[in-house]
Amino acid sequence: MSPVLVGAVTVLVIIVAVFLAYNANNGLPFVSTYDLKARLPNADALVKANEVRIGGARVGVVKSVVPVQRKNGAVEAELTLSLDKSAEPIPNDSTIEVRPKSPLGLKYLQITPGSSTVGYKAGETIPVRYATPEPGDIDKFFDMFNTPTRKAIQRNLAGFGNALAGRGPQLNEAIGALRGFLEEGEPASATLASPTTNFAGFFRAVAALSATVAPVAGEQASMFVALDRTFAAFAHVSSPYIEETIEKGPPTLDTVNAGLPKINPFLHDTARFFTALRPGAKALEETSPIIAESLHAGIPALNASPVLNNQLLPTAQALVAFQEAEGTMTGLQLLTDLNENLEAPLRFITPAQTTCNYFSLTFTQVASASGGGNKYGKWLNFISFPPPEGTNSESGQASAPANGPKGNHLHYNPLPNTAAPGQARGCEAGNAKYAEGQTVIGEAPQVWSEQTEGISQASGSESGSGGGGSE
């Protein structure tokens, strides 16, 4: 045998062995396989060359894992499986699941065969709906023990340890007492277990209630947090204040029960009072701005009222002394008599001013008549004109009132109307129209207006043009 040939064969065998070892996870070459595809919502760390098992036995390997996007935008993982021919066919109702192979995170694909007599053909795809149940990995289980959870567990263990430490005898007594509790509780348990009690319906109702309040769980959590703050505040005043309040509650309730029948009529009258008060309260809505302004305006007056109040006492004392002085009552009686005597003339005189403004106009005209002047004195303004000539003219002696010819007619009203009692409401003096060609003694046949301001000058000019001073 040639040493070269032996060496060449040996090298070839080693190369073939290394190649087979390198591709062992992908299956042996030149061996027929049963290839399928499978869809998963999440490959969950499954990678190429991971095993495929049925009933715990290895039946193939995962050739590839690629992401695939569906038409609705969702992303799935598509697996290419290389299975042994012995596993063919896989029933088309079989389920697939990613399972952990070791605590280190190694995974494999578990196929659970179904009962269908129809199987997948080579190259077909197992739909994603058969990727069930959802895998529960141990790493996800340990993920729930995060830092806050671990600290809370430590505090719980410390709390329970402190609660149980040194209480062995009490625990033994409690366990011994449980026998009597269970014996006494047997009838209650039998009642709860009876179908007539419908205890299962109670739990279903509780489940329905929990499902109803689940959407507001966040708000409820906030409420319990707020309640915790509230009860924490109560804890500071629980003793002795809240204890005393609870202790005095029954006597208070007895007093209230005794007093409520007597208070009821008052409450009834109060309801009637507020019912009657509604229109006034509604009116306040419109008048409240005026009331507010009045209150603001009243503040300075109230600030000044103490000074006025201090002056009222001596003023009242002076009035009392004046009332008690000799002759005061006699003077008051004389004033009363004077007022009674003046009442009748004042009833006639007062309208001349309040209605016709005659006194104010008189003083105004007198003042304006001498309004001009110089440093030597004031001037008196007047106009002179000759009286008209004719029968019984005012320029000389007359045996009768002037009665003509034209322009020589006497107009005289000794008692003009001033809206006095018994007279028409009007101001005749200064408003009488000059009746041309007529002798008028008494009430004028026509007047310019019932008012006087701004009319008397016009009527005066009319009378002046008619006959001078005859008006």
Image (spheres, rainbow, N blue to C red):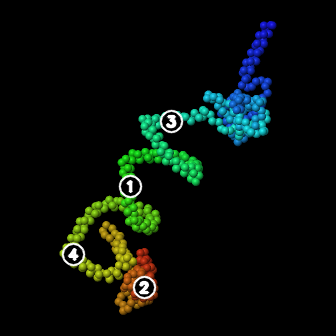
Residue most extreme to the top: 2
Residue at 42% from the left image edge and 35% from the top image edge: 166
For residue 251, which quarter of the picture? Answer: bottom left
For residue 265, which quarter of the picture? Answer: bottom left
Q: Is residue 378 left or right of residue 166?
A: left
Residue 194 x/y as whole percent? 57, 51
Label 2 with label 1: CB-CB less than 8 Å:
no
Q: Is residue 315 left or right of residue 163?
A: left
Q: Is residue 419 left or right of residue 205?
A: left
Work out whether residue 328 can be spotted: yes
Quick one: label 2 or label 1, which is nearer the N terminus?
A: 1
Residue most extreme to the left: 326
Residue at mark 1: 249
Q: Is 466 situated above or below 13?
A: below
Q: CA distance from mark 3 to mark 1?
A: 42 Å
Dot 1 crowding, Cα within 10 Å, few <14, some 14–19, many 20+? few
